[in-house]
Image (spheres, rainbow, N blue to C red):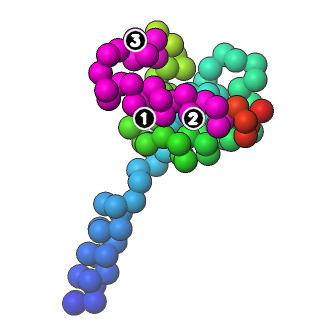
Amino acid sequence: MKQFLLIAFCVTSISAMAPQAVDAAQIKRACLASDRTAATRTRCSCIQRVANQALTRSDQKTVAKWFTNPHQAQELKMSQTARDDALWDRYQAFGQMAQAICS
């Protein structure tokens, strides 16, 4: 019984700490759903790998929305908050890295 409880506790702990599959590959899905002809599975996968290195999950969630509503990116760019400026800087660095690696 103790062994069963220990295993159950470990499984619960690991699953609570593991990233949720629903949140994974947000950039890739948004890229593939876009109507851009250059949005191939290979290129979108590459862009997602760069995003995993350059952006937080929260950043990726925000940036993925920009594929369907680019105006949101413009609003963030024009924002005067330090938080938005920092995200814009990370986004620009991500874009440069993705272009260099995935082109």
Which structural element holds mark 3? helix
Q: Which mark is residue 78?
A: 3
User: Residue 46's spot in the image, x, y percent?
Assistant: 68, 41
- Disc 2 residue type (three-letter): Phe
Reading the image, the residue beneath label 1 is: 59
- Label 2 residue SS: helix
Residue at 67% across, 41% down: 45
x and y percent of residue 16 in the render?
Answer: 31, 60
Q: Is residue 28 magenta?
A: no
Please name the predominant secondary structure of the magenta segment in the image: helix
Q: Quadrant of residue 42?
A: top right
Task: Name the amino acid type tagged 1.
Answer: Asp
Counting from the top left corner in percent of width and height, residue 63 is at: 48, 27
Dot 2 or dot 1: first in sequence order is 1
Highlighted range, magenta: 72-98
| Mark 3: few/some/many CA within 10 Å (<14, 14-19, 20+) | few
Q: Nearer the viewer, mark 3 or mark 1?
A: 3
Give the labeled residue for mark 2: 94
First along the sequence among labels 3 and 1: 1
Residue 87 seen in render:
yes
Secondary element at image label 1: helix
